[in-house]
Image (cartoon, rainbow, N blue to C red):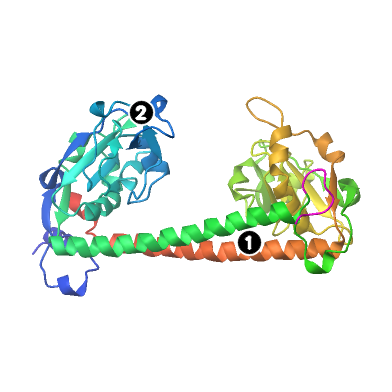
Amino acid sequence: MSKAMKDEKKALVPRLRFPEFRDAGEWEKTTIGEIGKFYYGKSAPKWSLEEDAPTPCVRYGELYTKFGPIITETYSRTNIDPGKLRFSKGGEILVPRVGEKTEDFGKCCCYLPLGDIAIGEMISVFETAQNPLFYTYYFRRLYRQFSKVVEGQNVKNLYYVELEPLEIYRPPLTEQQKIADCLSSLDALIAAQADKIDALKTHKKGLIQQLFPREGKTVPRLRFPEFQEAGEWTEHRLENMAKRGSGHTPNKKFPSYYNGGIKWVSLADSNKLDDGYIYDTKVEISDDGINNSSAVLYPAGTVILSRDAGVGKSAVLYSPMAVSQHFMAWQCYENMLSNWFFYYLLQKLKATFESIAVGNAIKTIGAAYFKEMTITAPSLPEQQKIADCLVSLDGMIAAHTEKLDSLKTHKNGLMQQLFPSPEAVEA
């Protein structure tokens, strides 16, 4: 037997198989078009959506933003005449036919077990007598193959006529059900874990609102027992409690100013803010970059705040880092202000910062505002108690997030092993 034939034979069986199917033989090679049929949904435009409209519907954008592999509830309702809509029977696979990224089409296929749901026109609907949940997961596994038949530049389209000839493998229905049950159970665990994280984040948000006084007040609504008789919080000029600074961007014409091992926080790191510590940065600068610009190397523990794009986002430096001119940086005086208390105070004030920022394309807060900024704070021991409480809660959130990531990684590994290699299908 040639190597090509051996590879093809290996591809006809997944790497991981449930014990009862290990002697069940190879999966049957077929095409998507041979196991079912496609049709398009009908229009449910944005202007027709109303909260109290009579007809629940699924729109193509929601496949990207709202749903996992299984649609368990709908988020939109349309007032379009039902006679002009196309409804699910329950058991269909929905594939977006319009999108921005080619690889997202396959990744966002969804199983719709619910009947009487109007399906938007930018959705390809697939009906099969096989197990539709199994094929939903299989289609997601084939996202690279789907991406190869996507058409268009800025707005990309995936027409179902291009999907019908794609080769796939078909196991017995009983094995399809076993795989679908396994992956859907894992998805239920993932969803439950995500709900735990959301609940903790909601709890934290509420705590922050209660542990800090409301605007114009000097006593918080929630106070630890040992501080309930400690009196009002005191207003201070921030300048008297922390050393304020900013940063700079070294001249990019000089390569020697960059890639020198000094972490440098810029707007490119916006997605790493609002998460407590910032550990690393997209760009690093060098000692030459520091020495030949107004950039400053700040010590670990410095609190930073974005005053431009992403206004109001904050973080605490995990290690010594520099920042760009788009950030404010405060080194808290140890005997006056807890850096973590200050970080959580900035988190509470985020909406305020967003509201006072000015500008059209990019909103910003001038440095002069921070020079005159005042904060209301309790004694240092109470600051520390508040900070410890919120840091502990963030630790719980981080631990649950790590568990969620682990579950997702486990599922991804299972997906790769429970289905034959997509690349081998093309071989």
So how many labels did they put on this image?
2
Q: Nearer the viewer, residue 73 or 26?
A: 73
Q: Position of residue 65 (x, y in %)?
A: 42, 42
Q: Main secondary structure of the magenta part?
A: loop
Q: Which residue occupies 69% across, 59% down?
A: 318
Where 128 sits versus 211, above or below?
above
Marks 1 and 2 sit apart, C-alpha to C-alpha, by 43 Å
Does residue 304 appear anywhere in the picture?
A: yes
Q: Which residues are magenta?
A: 214-221
Quarter of the figure with the N terminus: bottom left
Magenta stretch encompasses residue 215: yes
Residue 76 position by quadrant: top left
Horizontal side of residue 200 vs 314, given as left or right: left
Q: Position of residue 15 (x, y in %)?
A: 24, 66
Q: Which residue is mark 1?
A: 394
SS type, badge 2: loop
Q: Which residue is mark 2?
A: 79
